[in-house]
Image (cartoon, rainbow, N blue to C red):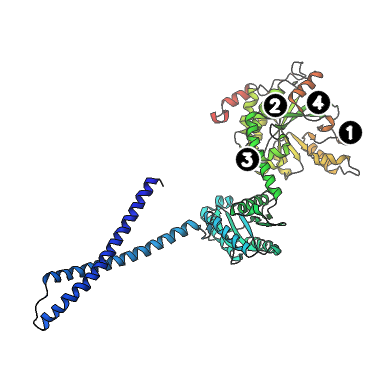
C-alpha cells in the first residue's frame, strides 16, 4: 500500500473513532442533563397533576424531552458500536485464520509454518529438547491429477493430511506447504532420536494403505526428508531458525526422491554439498551450450576379423572453464533432467557431421540418442535435415537407441525408426541385454544391428569366465539376421574370445582411447582414409534427391 493511501485510511479511521467518541460524550452529557432537569421538572409535574400546583417551566420540559431523545440516541449508538466491534473482531479472526491455514486441508500454510516452527523450537530448547522438521512429498502426484482429475487429487490431499495428523503427537504442528508438499515440526528427546524414526515409519505404513476416494481407489507412496536442530555434537547453530530446518529437510527429501522414492533420509552435510555441486553443473551446462564447450570425440569401430577400421562412434565430451573435464556419466543425465539434452545433442551432431564429411566414404558414424529425444515427433525429420545440410550419405549414419527407449512410446519410436530407415539410416539397438526388450519387439521393430553391452563383454577375460550370455546374443543376432557389435574390448584375450563367435564389429580401449575431431583427421590422413582419397564404394548416397524431396514436403515446423 502506498503512503498516501495509508494516510487516507488512517485519517478515515481516526474520523470514525472521533465520531464514536463524540456520540458517547453527547450521550453522557444527556444523561447528566437528564438527571439535572429531571430533578427539577418531575417534582413540579407531579405537584401540578396531583396537588394542583404550578406547571413546570416549558423550557425545562423541552430540555428534558431533548435529553430523553439524546439518551436514546446514545444508547442505540452504543449498541451499534458494540455490535460493530464484535463483527470487526470476528472478521479479523477469520482473516487471520485464512492467512495462516490452508483452505483445502485445514492445516497451517507455508506462511504461518515459519513462525510456528520457531516457536516450537524455542519452547523445546528451553526444556532441553530438540526439534525435528519433516518434509513430506507425494510420489507421482501429477499422474493422479492427470489420470483422475484435480478433484480426486484434492480429495487425496485432504485424506493424506488426515492420516498424517492422526499419527502426530499433540505437540507437533502440521502444515501444507503447497501442491503435494506437507511438513510437520515436532519436539523430541535428544537421547531418543529413534522415536522420530518410529514416527516416520508409522507414516509410511499408514500412507501405504489404499486411499478409497469417492469414485476411485488410489495407491500412492511418499518421500520424506528429516532435519534437526541437534546433531551428534549437540545443538547446531546453523539450524537455529525455521528457514534452515526447512531447507535441509527439503535437501534430504530430494535425496529420497533421487534414490527411488518411497523412503526417507535424515539430512547430512554431504547432501548439501552434492546439491550445490549439481546446481553448479546445471549452470555450467547452460553456459557450456552457449559457449560451445561440448564437443564430439570419436571411438574407433573395427572389423574384428580383418582389423580394418570401419567407422567411429561419437561420444560427448565437456571441458568446462570452471569445472574442468566432466564425465558424460555425470552431465548427460542432468542435461536430460533439465531438458537440455536435445539442444546439446543437436550441437554435437552438427560438429560430428562436419568432421565425418572429411572421412573416407566407407567409414560410418554412430550416434547415441537419448530417450528424451525420441519423444519429439519431428526427430527423424530433424536428422534428415542435418544430413541434407551437410551432404552426408544416410547409409554412413548409424543411430543407436537403448532398450529403455522402447517403453516410453513404442508407437512413436516405431514411426521414427521407420522414417529414418526409409531414407537409408541404419538403426542399432544399443546396450542389448541390460534392459527389458522382448523378442517380440526385436522381431517387429526394424533394427539393423545389435550392440552387446560392455558389462557382458568385459567378463570374457575373467578366470573361469562364462561366455554363454555373449554366445546367446550372437546366436540371437544370427537368427534375426542382425550384425553384432561388441563394446568394451580392452585386451587381446577378449578379442580372441569374440573372434571365435563369428564375424563381429567391435570397439574398445584395445584400439585406442576416444579422440577429438582433429586427432581423428590426423589419424585418417596417416592411413589414407580422408575423403580426398578415392572411395572404395561409389554408390550414390541415399540422402540425395529422395531425402531433399522428403524434407521439402515437410511442414515448416519440422524443417526448422
Q: Specify the label residue 309 is tagged with.
A: 4
Q: At numbered mark 3, what does the secondary structure look like: helix, strand or loop?
A: loop
Crowding around mark 2 (Cα neighbors within 10 Å: few <14, some 14 to 19, many 20+) is: many
Crowding around mark 4 (Cα neighbors within 10 Å: few <14, some 14 to 19, many 20+) is: many
Q: Quadrant of residue 414?
A: top right
Q: Which residue occupies 54% across, 57% down?
A: 115
Q: CA distance from mark 4 to mark 2?
A: 18 Å
Instruction: Using the image, determine if residue 351 lies above or below residue 478.
Output: above
In front: label 4 or label 2: 2
Q: Which residue is mark 3?
A: 338
Q: Which residue occupies 61% across, 36% down?
A: 376
Q: At numbered mark 2, what does the secondary structure look like: helix, strand or loop?
A: helix
Depth order, front residue of 401/250: 250
Q: Quadrant of residue 182?
A: bottom right
In front: label 3 or label 4: 3
The mark nearer the N terminus, 3 or 4, is 4
User: Residue 61 in the image: x percent, y percent?
Assistant: 14, 71
Q: Which residue occupies 33% across, 53% down?
A: 12
Amino acid at each position: 500500500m502506498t503512503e498516501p493511501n495509508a494516510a487516507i485510511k488512517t485519517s478515515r479511521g481516526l474520523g470514525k473513532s472521533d465520531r464514536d467518541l463524540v456520540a458517547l460524550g453527547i450521550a453522557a452529557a444527556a444523561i447528566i442533563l437528564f438527571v439535572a432537569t429531571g430533578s427539577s421538572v418531575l417534582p413540579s409535574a407531579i405537584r401540578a397533576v396531583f396537588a394542583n400546583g404550578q406547571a413546570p417551566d416549558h423550557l425545562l420540559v423541552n430540555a428534558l424531552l431533548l435529553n430523553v431523545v439524546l439518551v436514546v440516541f446514545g444508547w442505540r449508538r452504543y449498541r451499534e458500536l458494540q455490535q460493530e466491534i464484535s463483527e470487526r473482531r470476528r472478521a479479523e479472526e477469520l482473516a487471520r485464520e485464512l492467512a495462516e491455514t490452508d483452505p483445502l486441508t485445514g492445516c497451517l500454510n507455508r506462511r504461518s509454518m515459519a513462525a510456528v516452527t520457531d516457536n516450537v523450537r524455542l519452547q523445546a530448547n528451553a526444556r532441553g529438547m530438540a526439534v525435528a522438521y519433516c518434509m513430506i512429498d507425494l510420489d507421482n502426484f501429477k499422474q493422479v491429477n492427470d489420470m483422475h482429475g484435480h478433484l480426486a487429487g484434492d480429495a487425496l490431499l485432504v485424506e493424506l493430511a488426515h492420516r498424517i495428523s492422526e499419527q502426530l503427537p499433540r505437540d507437533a504442528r502440521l502444515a501444507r506447504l503447497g501442491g503435494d508438499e506437507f511438513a510437520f515440526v515436532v519436539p523430541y528427546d535428544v537421547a531418543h532420536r529413534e522415536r522420530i524414526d518410529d514416527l516416520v515409519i508409522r507414516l509410511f505404513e499408514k500412507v501405504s494403505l489404499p486411499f478409497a476416494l469417492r469414485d476411485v481407489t488410489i495407491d500412492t507412496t511418499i518421500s520424506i526428508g528429516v532435519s534437526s536442530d541437534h546433531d551428534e555434537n549437540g545443538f547446531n547453530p546453523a539450524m537455529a531458525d525455521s528457514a534452515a530446518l526447512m531447507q535441509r529437510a527439503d535437501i534430504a527429501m530430494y535425496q529420497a526422491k533421487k534414490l527411488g522414492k518411497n523412503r526417507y533420509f535424515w539430512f547430512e552435510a554431504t547432501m548439501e554439498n552434492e546439491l550445490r555441486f549439481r546446481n553448479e553443473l546445471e549452470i555450467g551446462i547452460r553456459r557450456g551450450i552457449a559457449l560451445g564447450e561440448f564437443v564430439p570425440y570419436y571411438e574407433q569401430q573395427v572389423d574384428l576379423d580383418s582389423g580394418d577400421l570401419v567407422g567411429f562412434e561419437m561420444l560427448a565430451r565437456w571441458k568446462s572453464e570452471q569445472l574442468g573435464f566432466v564425465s558424460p556419466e555425470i552431465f548427460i543425465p542432468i542435461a536430460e533432467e533439465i531438458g537440455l539434452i536435445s539442444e546439446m545433442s543437436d550441437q554435437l551432431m552438427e560438429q560430428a557431421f562436419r568432421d565425418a564429411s572429411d572421412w573416407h566414404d566407407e567409414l560410418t558414424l554412430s550416434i547415441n540418442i537419448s530417450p528424451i529425444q525420441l519423444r519429439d515427433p519431428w526427430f527423424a525429420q530433424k536428422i534428415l535435415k542435418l544430413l541434407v545440410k551437410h551432404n552426408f550419405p544416410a547409409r554412413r549414419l548409424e543411430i543407436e537407441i537403448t532398450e529403455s527407449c522402447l517403453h516410453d512410446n513404442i508407437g512413436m519410436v516405431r514411426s521414427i525408426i521407420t522414417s529414418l530407415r526409409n531414407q537409408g539410416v541404419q538403426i542399432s539397438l544399443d546396450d542389448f541385454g541390460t534392459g527389458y526388450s522382448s523378442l517380440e519387439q526385436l522381431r517387429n521393430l526394424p533394427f539393423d544391428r545389435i550392440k552387446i553391452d560392455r558389462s557382458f563383454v568385459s567378463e570374457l577375460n575373467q578366470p573361469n569366465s562364462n561366455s554363454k550370455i555373449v554366445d546367446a546374443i550372437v546366436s540371437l543376432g544370427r537368427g534375426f539376421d542382425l550384425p553384432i557389435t561388441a563394446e568394451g574390448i580392452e585386451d587381446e584375450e577378449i578379442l580372441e574370445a569374440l573372434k571365435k563367435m563369428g564375424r563381429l564389429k567391435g570397439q574398445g580401449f584395445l584400439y585406442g582411447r576416444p579422440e577429438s575431431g582433429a586427432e581423428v583427421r590426423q589419424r585418417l590422413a596417416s592411413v589414407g582414409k580422408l575423403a580426398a582419397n578415392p572411395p572404395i564404394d561409389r554408390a550414390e548416397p541415399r540422402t540425395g534427391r529422395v531425402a531433399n524431396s522428403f524434407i521439402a514436403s515437410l511442414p515448416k515446423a519440422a524443417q526448422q
